[in-house]
Image: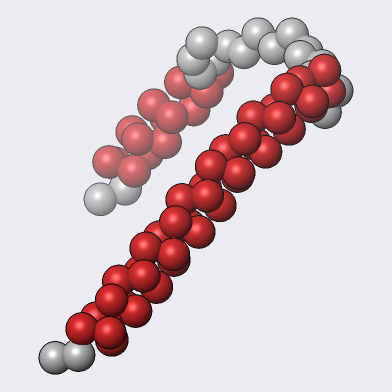
């Protein structure tokens, strides 16, 4: 094995990993700065919350009667 080739590969590996590490650090710093800069505008894009209309908790009496009648009609039809 050629020691020069091995050392060149090791240097290239360290340089590449170092570049990735530096890029990740710069990206984290940029994200934190953007978060701080855009914090005042965070609520500008969210729509105002409207009070939810109260819905019935279940089916009405008329609906229950219609379902019961349909079940009886189906059973008698067999």
Q: Nearer the viewer, residue 39 or 19?
A: 19
Residue located 73% across and 22% down the image: 36
The reply, left or right, for residue 12 in relation to residue 34 is left
Q: Is residue 6 visible?
A: yes
Residue at image position (25%, 50%) is: 78
Q: Residue at x 74, y 8 (%)?
A: 51
Say which quadrant the N terminus sits in.
bottom left
Image height of 65 relative to 70, above or below = above
Q: How is the image coloured?
A: secondary structure
Residue 52, image x and y in percent?
70, 12
Q: How many marks?
A: 0
Q: Quadrant of residue 54?
A: top right
Q: From where the camera sits, is residue 47 visible?
A: no
**Residue 21 in the image: above or below residue 38:** below
Please report the residue visible at 76 percent of the width from the left and 14 percent of the height from the top.
Answer: 49
Residue 23 in the image: state x and y as whole percent: 56, 52
Q: Quadrant of residue 68?
A: top left
Is residue 74 or residue 10 the one in the foreground? 10
Which residue occupies the extreme bottom position in the image?
1
Q: Nearer the viewer, residue 29 or 57?
A: 29
Asked which quadrant contains residue 35, the reply is top right
Q: Does residue 34 appear to the left or right of 61 in the view shown?
A: right
* Foreground pick, 11 / 25: 11
- The location of residue 53, given as percent across then percent down, is 71, 11
Rendered location of residue 31, percent (x, y): 65, 36
């Amino acid at each position: 094995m050629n020691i020069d080739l091995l050392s060149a590969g090791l240097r290239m590996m360290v340089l590449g990993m170092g570049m990735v590490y530096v890029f990740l650090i710069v990206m984290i710093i940029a994200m934190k700065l953007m978060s701080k800069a855009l914090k005042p505008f965070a609520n500008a894009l969210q729509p105002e919350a409207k009070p939810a209309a109260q819905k019935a908790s279940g089916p009405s009496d008329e609906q229950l009667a219609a379902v019961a009648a349909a079940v009886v009609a189906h059973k008698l039809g067999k």
